[in-house]
Amino acid sequence: MKRLFQLSLAAVALLFVTGLTSCKKKMKDADIQAAIEKVLMADPDMAKTTVMVKDGVATLTGECKDEACKAKCETAVKAIEGVTSVVNNCSIAPPPPPVVAPVADGLSQAITDALKDYPTVKSELKDGVLTLTGEIQKTSLQKLMQALNALRPMGIKNIESKGLVKK
């Protein structure tokens, strides 16, 4: 009888332990995904990424600014409870195109306008240095130089008139 009681008690304990382990709360994919999205949206670096979760596997897509950002996203997602693994399909954003200063076009036009009354004077602008060549009357030279000096704020660093012949 004592033996039967011990066996019954062992069976009840086994059922109880089995019940506890099977009742362990398993997170739903939707809950995991919501938690990940909250973390991603909280950081501006990771805000351009999206996530899909299936059976605890989080798949990241979207665009990261660099490799460090991509690794940061993966690390943050791995830390979320319920994530079993991470597939990081994020792409790296291409570098921005070089900025072309529209001032150069405006400056070229302004130089052309300043020289329109002096058809014998030619100019070349390179790295902010304006080189003048050709011929000009001495009486007109001061007026031309004043007009060109007024363009310095637009990007002229220096004006060279070494090749300019004064009549």
Image (tube, grey):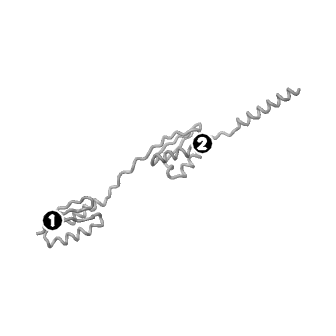
Q: Residue at x 21, y 60 (%)?
A: 124
* Screen quadrant of the C terminus: bottom left
Q: Which residue is mark 1?
A: 164
**Residue 121 pos. (x, y %):** 16, 64
Q: Amino acid at mark 2?
A: Ala
In which quarter of the view is residue 15 placed? top right
Q: Amino acid at mark 1?
A: Leu
**Residue 159 pos. (x, y %):** 23, 65
Q: Residues within 10 Å of mark 2 (few under 14, many from 20)?
A: few
Q: Residue at x 65, y 39 (%)?
A: 26
Left or right: residue 59 versus residue 16 is left
Whether residue 50 is situated above or below residue 13 in the rendered picture: below
Q: Earlier in the sequence, mark 2 or mark 1?
A: 2
CB atoms of marks 2 and 1 within 8 Å: no
- Identify the secondary structure beneath mark 2: helix
**Residue 151 pos. (x, y %):** 27, 67
* Screen quadrant of the N terminus: top right
Left or right: residue 113 versus residue 16 is left
Q: Which residue is mark 2?
A: 30
- Identify the secondary structure beneath mark 1: strand
